[in-house]
Image (cartoon, rainbow, N blue to C red):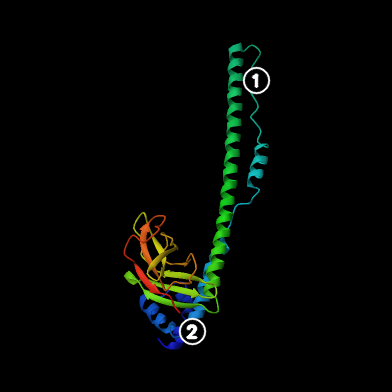
Amino acid sequence: MTTADLHTLTGAYALHALDDDERERFERHAADCADCAQEVRELTATAARLGLAVTDSPGSALKDQVMRRITTVRQEAPRTLPLSAPRAVGIRRRRRGHRALAAALAAAAALGGTAAWQHERAQDAREQARQAERRADQVAAVLTAPDATSRTAKLADGASGTVVVSRSRDRAVFISSKMAKPPGGKVYQLWFDDAGTMRSAGLMDPGRTSEAVLMKGSVDGASGMGITVEPAGGSTRPSSPPVALLGLPV
């Protein structure tokens, strides 16, 4: 594979679509090619934003629509009996009518409760989408910053990790590729290394093996970063040996 060929792999690399050999050769090339490194950061940010484009939430008027439709459902008319029918039959019919009415009211109340629940879920979904969009914007701002620098390291079992730092924004992004999922009930936790003191920088998604994570907190004062396996919810300080340690790029 020629250098010209390697220049064309930025998109595939950003989407984690290269095999191990291609990825290693491209990473060696990108370490000395500022254009390719910058293009990878921009494509990674674009891929993150495209994932938000398919977000679709139920309309806010869902509850009102359901409640209006309830009023259009007609109750079945009672059947009439000859006047000679025993009075007991009439009593039973009235009782059945009362039970039917009670059932209808209960069904309407349940349907109204379901509509309210669906409305709340729709609001939750919209808020989650807004939060995801804000995170994507923040990741993109770091990856595409004019002063963004990166460092890539090989992790266990063929995985790799890249930390991208923007000193002007005082933020960092960690990009993982093909990391093994943590054990059940565990999560990967990111840390900033402040002269030997580890400061929590957030949690990774335990259900994903490749992702871009905006590290929590400022970069200022940190010389490196680390990753540990912690109980779900994270820890206040590392409780296990580090999975990886990376120096922050200058």
The answer to whether 31 is drawn above or below residue 171 in the figure is below
Tell me the kind of residue under disc 1: Thr
Q: Quadrant of the N terminus?
A: bottom left
Q: Residues within 10 Å of mark 2 (few under 14, many from 20)?
A: few
Residue 80 is tagged as 1
Front position in the image: 166 or 70 = 166
Q: Image quadrant for the C terminus? A: bottom left
Towards the viewer: 239 or 118? 239
Which percent across, then down, holds residue 85?
A: 62, 13
Residue drawn at (61%, 19%) of the image: 94
Instruction: Say which of marks 1 and 2 sits in front.
Output: 2
Q: Position of residue 23 (x, y in %)?
A: 39, 77
Could you tell which of marks 1 and 2 lies nearer the N-terminus? 2
For the point 61% across and 39% down, which residue is it? 112
Taking the image as drawn, is residue 178 in sight? no
What mark, if any, has residue 222 been given in the picture?
A: none
Nearest the viewer among 189 and 78 is 189
Q: Which residue is identified by label 2? A: 34
Type of amino acid under label 2: Ala
* Residue at 57 percent of width and 29 percent of height: 103
Q: Dot 1: few (<14), some (14–19), or many (≥20) neighbours within 10 Å? A: few
